[in-house]
Amino acid sequence: MQRAVEELVRVLETYRGRDKVIRTACYGAQLVGGVLCRDSSPDGSSRRLGRSLLLFSTQLSHCRTVLRLFDDLSMLAYSQSYGLGATEEDLCVRGLSVLTNVADQLYYPCEHVAWAADARLVPVRSERWWLLSTVLWGSSLLLGILRSVRVLVLLKRKLQRCERGEEDRSRVPGLRRQVQAELLSVVSSAADLCNAVHWMPPGFLWAGRFPDWTVGLMGTISSVIDLIKMSSSQSES
């Protein structure tokens, strides 16, 4: 128990760790709140608790939006360090990674303008900027899925060469861990992409058709996977 508490404290002391915990709590509250709001019991106590959890989820979402006001520089630093992906062996992976970085970099200022418009800090309509930020987020997720699929194809080829003895067999465990990580990335991004489509204008695929609990479920799946990946990377370092 003490070790678990210490691990949680260590995660919360970092910005990225705290954001992932808040994100998990946000979508978890939306999942449980959405399920409780479906309750049809006469006293309505479950529905009241469900509405409270949905309000709590909304406030956590606002909290994350405000915290992202300071993410532009860190994203820019990452994009500059990656550049055109000269260290990548595969041209397709390089191209998809660069496009993902561009979409991510543009996402932040668009979301900032939308937030500022809602806060009445700038005299513009927020709807268009929220839509643009959602499109950029969805594009980044789709590009990330395509990149992970391409990486999985390359890793499978390397595994086959190692298993045939054409390359060092000692690389097999590491390659398999990379395959697992990429598979988790695909599932996480796919879950988020489902929500991104849901927040598009009505008429686009399944936009606007998800109930609260489904949005919460997709977000919780993605958030838990991100926490698992973060924990795995820290334990390996």
Image (cartoon, rainbow, N blue to C red):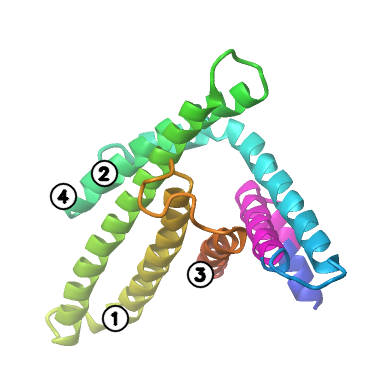
Give the Cα distance between marks 4 and 3: 28 Å
Q: Identify residue for label 1.
A: 172
Position in image of residue 15 (x %, y %): 64, 46
* Relative to 201, residue 182 above or below: below
- Crowding at dot 2, Cα within 10 Å, few <14 / some 14-19 / many 20+, comes out as some
**Tag 4: Cα neighbours inside 10 Å, few (<14), some, or many (≥20)?**
few
Q: Tell me which numbered mark, 2 or 1, is placed earlier along the sequence.
A: 2
Residue 127 position in % (x across, y down)? 51, 29
Q: CA distance from mark 1 to mark 4?
A: 24 Å
Q: Which residue is mark 4?
A: 91
Looking at the rendered image, the disc whose residue lies closer to the viewer, 1 or 4, is 4
Q: Nearer the viewer, mark 4 or mark 3?
A: 4
**Which one is in front, 220 or 154?**
220
Mark number for residue 236?
3
The picture places residue 136, in percent across and down from the top left corner, at 39, 38
Q: CA distance from mark 2 to mark 4?
A: 9 Å
Residues in magenta?
9-34
Q: Amino acid at mark 1?
A: Val
Pick whichever, 127 or 9, lies toward us.
127
What's the amino acid at mark 2? Answer: Gly
Disc 3 crowd rating (10 Å Cα; few below 14, some 14-19, many 20+) is few
Pointer 2 residue = 85
Q: Mark 2 or mark 3: which comes first in sequence?
A: 2
Query: Residue at 42% across / 32% down in the picture?
Result: 132
